[in-house]
Amino acid sequence: MTDKTLITGVAHLGIRVHDLERSRTFYEQLGFDFVVGPVGPEPVAILKHPNGVEINLILNAAEAQTENVLMDVPDKHAGYTHVALAVRDVDAAKRLLDNANIEITGGPMNYPSGARGLFIRDPDRNVVELYQHGDA
């Protein structure tokens, strides 16, 4: 397949979680709105940000996690390690996180491109980067 116009964007992010209310509260603090759920055989809850980013919380994690198998163990497994959500201003994002008592697990950091980022973890230890594009 070589048609570069086939993919038009990211439709949604699927994130496996253990507890809907706990995860819903976390993502609502980042500005996401609850749409519907749980629905379907998995089941799934859908949250959407006013900017159009959609998250599907997949509610089938057997237990609350204390570590992330992709990030927190010595053996490195294949898989998605994090999602990077674009922000206008990392410093403003940091202030909002501090006010919401959401722990910053990495950064803020500056990248060679002029971009900046910081990392947080959701209640199930899934990694979320808040990423400010550089000027270059």
Image (cartoon, rainbow, N blue to C red):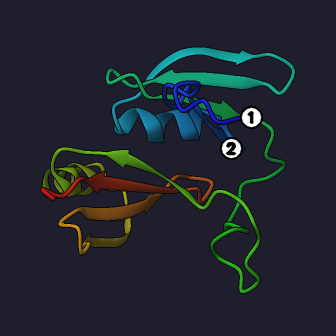
Where is residue 7 drawn, in percent x and y?
56, 28
Q: What residue is at 43 percent from the left and 28 percent from the top? A: 53
Q: What residue is at 18 percent from the left and 58 percent from the top? A: 134
Helix, strand or loop status at disc 1: loop
* Residue most extreme to the bottom: 74
Q: What residue is at 20 percent from the left and 56 percent from the top? A: 90
Q: In screen coordinates, is 99 left or right of 75?
A: left
Q: In screen coordinates, is 31 left or right of 48?
A: left
Q: In screen coordinates, is 34 left or right of 80?
A: left
Mark 1 neighbour class, 10 Å CA radius: few under 14, some 14 to 19, many 20 or more? many
- Residue 45 vs 71, above or below: the answer is above
Find residue 106 and report its image quarter.
bottom left
Mark 2 neighbour class, 10 Å CA radius: few under 14, some 14 to 19, many 20 or more? many
- Badge number at residue 8: none
* Residue most extreme to the front: 2
Where is residue 13 drawn, in percent x and y?
58, 36
What residue sits right under mark 1 in the picture? 59
Where is residue 74 drawn, in percent x and y?
71, 86
Q: Amino acid at mark 1?
A: Leu
- Residue 32 vs 27, above or below: the answer is above
Where is residue 128 drawn, in percent x and y?
46, 54
Q: Amino acid at mark 2?
A: Val
First along the sequence among labels 2 and 1? 2
What residue sits right under mark 2 in the picture? 17
Find residue 1 and report its image quarter.
top right
Q: What residue is at 64 percent from the left and 76 percent from the top? A: 72
* Most foreground residue, 10 or 82: 10
- Residue 54 vs 68, above or below: the answer is above
Q: Quadrant of the C terminus?
A: bottom left
- The CA distance from mark 2 to mark 1 is 5 Å
Find residue 51 and report its image quarter.
top left
Q: Assess whether mark 1 and mark 2 are in contact (beta carbons under 8 angstroms).
A: yes
